[in-house]
Image (cartoon, rainbow, N blue to C red):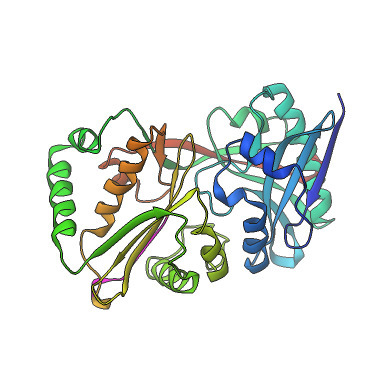
């Protein structure tokens, strides 16, 4: 068995010719797009790199990692895709079993530490599922449970069936909120893929203002979302953008759904506050529209990332346990 690992910097290294076919075979969400990785990394406080593992001459696995610079020049390799909250930062072809994945992970760890330099303290894994923890466990490796991710298993044939499954108070309020949005003559709603009518700068300004108002989650090393990134993201066929405008064309709220044959991810949500002229009920209405796509297209479920878990549970999403793992440099090397 021949294994080789290459670490690429999407900011400057050209896209590997086999990457597009691999991403399609592995059913990856949009943020794995090589061009988007480069865009995100060029503007991020900590660049994202990509480790590619080849098995017997065929690309078999990949790992996205941010090289985080800390005090005194110490560096840490954080394995995660920055805009895929709740999803592990690696991917493999389906036919690669647990033994093969463990081997490739060890090799990718080693090469990422070498790439990060002598000041690298080790590797930190985010968003591991219970099934993924054993792949990075072992002597000298530390793990702990962290905040879970909200995921809904789709067992419904209609949106109304999903609403009917919710607790009585939530289903009544949700139906009322959807009706109020639909009947408001001063709200224009559009939910579609490949949105060429949207301006990335306007979206980024709304998203970043919203994030500032509510604050970033703890241990979030991401910088602001950049206009160029969102401008390209919303134009993709596998990204659905939901917008609410008022009658004068002012953007009230924005959400996006990273579509996937398996589990789409409800990624961004941003809205004007009431003091800024925003409208009520839009957040809950957005879930009804996201579920309309999930149910109508037979997706396996819907992921809504981390945070607000109690509220999301009221909408039928359930917390999926997640772990983090730390691998000191001597162990990874």
Q: Is residue 95 left or right of residue 208?
A: right
Q: Is residue 311 at least partly visible in the picture?
A: no
Give percent across and percent down for residue 248: 26, 77
125 w.r.t. 97: above or below: below
Report the quarter where the C terminus lies.
top right
9 w.r.t. 294: above or below: below
Give percent across and percent down for residue 237: 50, 50
Q: Quadrant of residue 96?
A: top right
- Count of marks, rendered view: 0
The magenta-colored residue range is 268-274
Instruction: Write the residue at 81% across / 42% down.
Output: 110
Residue 29 among magenta residues = no
81 w.r.t. 151: above or below: below
Instruction: Write the residue at 68% across / 38% down.
Output: 22
Give percent across and percent down for residue 285: 25, 53
Viewer-side residue, 47 vs 226: 226
Q: Is residue 170 at least partly visible in the picture?
A: yes
226 w.r.t. 190: above or below: below
Report the quarter where the N terminus lies.
top right
Instruction: Write the residue at 62% across / 57% down.
Output: 36
Give percent across and percent down for residue 208: 45, 70
Residue furthest to the right in view is: 2
Q: Is residue 81 left or right of residue 1?
A: left
Instruction: Write the residue at 62% across / 35% down.
Output: 26
Q: Is residue 319 left or right of residue 119?
A: left
């Amino acid at each position: 068995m021949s294994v080789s690992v290459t670490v690429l910097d999407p900011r400057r290294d050209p896209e590997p010719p086999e990457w597009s076919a691999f991403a399609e075979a592995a059913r990856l969400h949009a943020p794995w797009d090589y061009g988007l990785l480069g865009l995100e990394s060029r503007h991020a406080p900590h660049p994202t790199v990509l480790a590619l593992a080849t098995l017997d001459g065929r690309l078999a696995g990949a790992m996205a990692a941010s090289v985080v610079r800390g005090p005194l020049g110490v560096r840490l390799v954080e394995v995660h895709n920055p805009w895929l909250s709740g999803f592990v930062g690696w991917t493999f072809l389906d036919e690669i079993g647990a033994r093969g994945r463990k081997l490739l992970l060890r090799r990718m760890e080693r090469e990422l530490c070498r790439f990060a330099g002598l000041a690298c303290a080790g590797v930190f894994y985010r968003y591991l599922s219970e099934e993924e923890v054993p792949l990075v466990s072992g002597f000298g490796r530390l793990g702990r449970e962290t905040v879970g991710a909200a995921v809904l298993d789709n067992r419904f044939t209609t949106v109304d069936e999903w609403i009917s499954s919710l607790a009585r108070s939530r289903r009544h309020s949700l139906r009322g909120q959807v009706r109020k949005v639909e009947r408001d003559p001063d709200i224009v709603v559009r939910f579609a893929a490949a949105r060429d009518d949207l301006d990335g700068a306007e979206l980024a300004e709304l998203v970043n203002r919203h994030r500032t108002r509510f604050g970033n989650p703890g241990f979030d090393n991401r910088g602001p979302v950049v206009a160029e990134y969102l401008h390209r993201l919303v134009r993709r066929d596998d990204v659905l953008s939901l917008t609410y405008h008022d009658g004068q064309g002012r953007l009230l709220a924005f959400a996006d759904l990273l579509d996937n044959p398996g589990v789409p991810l409800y990624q961004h949500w941003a809205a004007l506050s009431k003091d800024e002229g925003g409208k009520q009920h839009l957040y809950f209405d957005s879930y009804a529209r996201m579920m309309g796509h999930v149910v109508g297209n037979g997706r396996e479920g819907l992921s809504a990332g981390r945070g607000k878990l109690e509220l999301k549970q009221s909408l039928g999403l359930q917390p999926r346990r997640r772990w983090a793992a730390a691998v000191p440099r001597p162990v990874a090397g």
